[in-house]
Image (cartoon, rainbow, N blue to C red):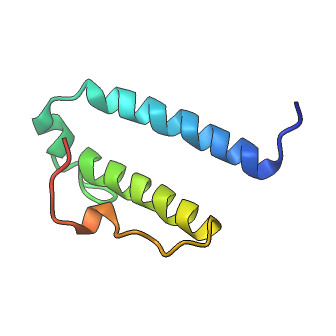
Amino acid sequence: MDLSLTETLFAYDRWATRALIAACAELSQEEFERPVGIGPGSVERTLNHLVSALFFFADRLNRHKPRPRLEEDGRNKT
């Protein structure tokens, strides 16, 4: 099967995101929320940012209005 570059990138992103979520499932809530001093500030906030970016690009590629960003809703994610 010959995948286009876009299909290959989305397949890799799907694999990497699932691997990241599986790794995060092993963290305690405190570890998940702890400030790490880089990027958005914690594993939780970094994951929120990555998922929000994925939703944004999926919405734009489908010519939909982008949904609200997860990191801007003021709620903690568990």
Identify which residue, 12 or 56, lies in the foreground: 56
Identify which residue, 62 or 10, lies in the foreground: 62
Q: Considering only vertical position in the picture, is 24 above or below 13?
A: above
Residue 7, percent from left and from top = 74, 46
Q: Considering only vertical position in the picture, is 12 above or below 53?
A: above
The residue positioned 20% from the left and 47% from the top of the image is 77
> How many numbered markers are drawn?
0
Q: Considering only vertical position in the picture, is 26 above or below 77?
A: above
Compared across the picture, whether 43 is left or right of 28 comes to: right
- Residue at the far left in the pictured view: 30
- Residue at the far top in the pictured view: 26
Residue 20 picture quarter: top left
The residue positioned 37% from the left and 58% from the top of the image is 49
Identify which residue, 44 or 76, lies in the foreground: 76
Compared across the picture, whether 47 is left or right of 78 comes to: right
Q: Considering only vertical position in the picture, is 50 above or below 43?
A: below
Residue 25, percent from left and from top = 28, 28
- Residue at the far right in the pictured view: 2
The residue positioned 49% from the left and 75% from the top of the image is 65
Residue 5, percent from left and from top = 80, 49
Quarter in which the N terminus is drawn: top right
Quarter in which the C terminus is drawn: top left
Residue 3 picture quarter: top right
The residue positioned 54% from the left and 72% from the top of the image is 64
Residue 61, percent from left and from top = 64, 66
